[in-house]
Image (cartoon, rainbow, N blue to C red):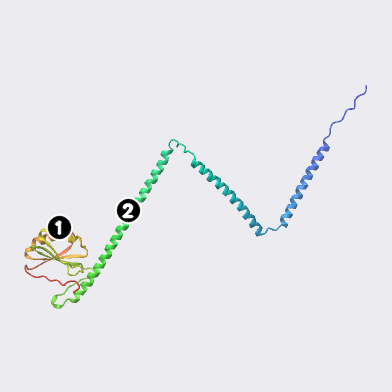
Amino acid sequence: MRRRKRLGAVSLFSFQDIVTGMCGIMIFMVLVQVLGLVDYRDNVEYTVEDSKSYDEDALKREIGELEKRLERIRQRSRTIAAAPKEAPRPGEYEKVAGKFTEKERIIAALVSQMHDLETQVAVARDADAKSRERIKEMERTRRLLEQQIANLGSSKGVTLIPQRGESKIPFYVICSSQGLDIRRPFEANSAVGRIPASDIKEQFSEFLADLDHTTHAAVLLVRPTGVAAMNVAVELLKQNNFAFGRDPLEEWAVVTFGEAGQ
């Protein structure tokens, strides 16, 4: 009986050669392409104008994209605003109300501070105006005193000012049974004030309230019948911290003062 011829084992050696060859060819082509790109990069010269135009075009495209996104966001915002509001979650209202309350408290505190500062500024301005007016009044009084001193003769006596600018401005109070007769001869506003005995406390207090005890002092000229009026005047002067002096005056003696500016 004839036997079949047994075939030998299948060999894959040729297929592996083909695969290996193809891989080598691919690697070789990749290397060739890389070398070509390197040469191209070295040979191509980029100019500032080209890069600038490229950057400007890219920026324009990016700006266009951003504008489109912005428009979409705006449309979405309008859609959300037009949509019906959802009911707040539990506790959300209290949280928001607490934030508003805190902000209102901070705003109220700032408003209070602002009002305090405005009050302080107003007080400072008022004090500055009063100080300026007082300085002007003292300057006028100083000139009047210098003029009065220059006009005094040897027969009228001598007036001494220990330190010019530190002496106080005198006002004279003639005390009698009829009340108080007030004279201010060395001031521009030298109006004569007569206070009846029944109104000494009220009217003399008002008179002293218009003066400054640091710049004015009283000279009491007391007639024999004016002791009671003098006592009331002295009490009011002490209460208002005014310095004062007392001189006796005959009952029927006539007192004259040179008017300011004469």
Q: Quadrant of residue 203?
A: bottom left
Tell me where residue 104 appears, x and y as whole percent: 38, 46
Residue at position x 63%, y 54% from top? 57
x and y percentages locating residue 216 in the rendered image: 20, 65
Q: Residue furthest bottom?
A: 154
> For the residues marked 2 and 1, what is the alpha-carbon distance in whole angstroms?
35 Å
Q: Residue at x 18, y 65 (%)?
A: 217
Q: Residue furthest top?
A: 1
Label 2: state its secondary structure: helix
**Residue 14 in view, yes or no:** yes
What is the three-letter code of the residue carrying label 2?
Asp
Choose between 54 and 158: the one closer to the eye: 54
Q: Neighbour class for label 2 at 10 Å: few (<14), some, many (≥20)?
A: few
Residue drawn 35% across the image and 51% down it = 111
Residue 206 image offset from top left, x and y in percent:
17, 59
Most foreground residue, 63 or 12: 63
User: What residue is disc 2 on?
Assistant: 116
Q: In the image as oriented, which residue stretches furthest toward the front? A: 82
Task: Pick the residue in front: 22 or 147.
Answer: 147
Horizontal side of residue 86 vs 70, given as left or right = left
Residue on which disc 1 sits: 202
Binning the other alpha carbons within 10 Å of mark 1 as few (below 14), some (14 to 19) or many (20 upward) gives: few
- Image-based side of 7 in relation to 207, left or right: right
Q: Is residue 133 above or below residue 17?
A: below
Q: Position of residue 19 (x, y in %)?
A: 79, 40
* Res. 241 visible in picture: no
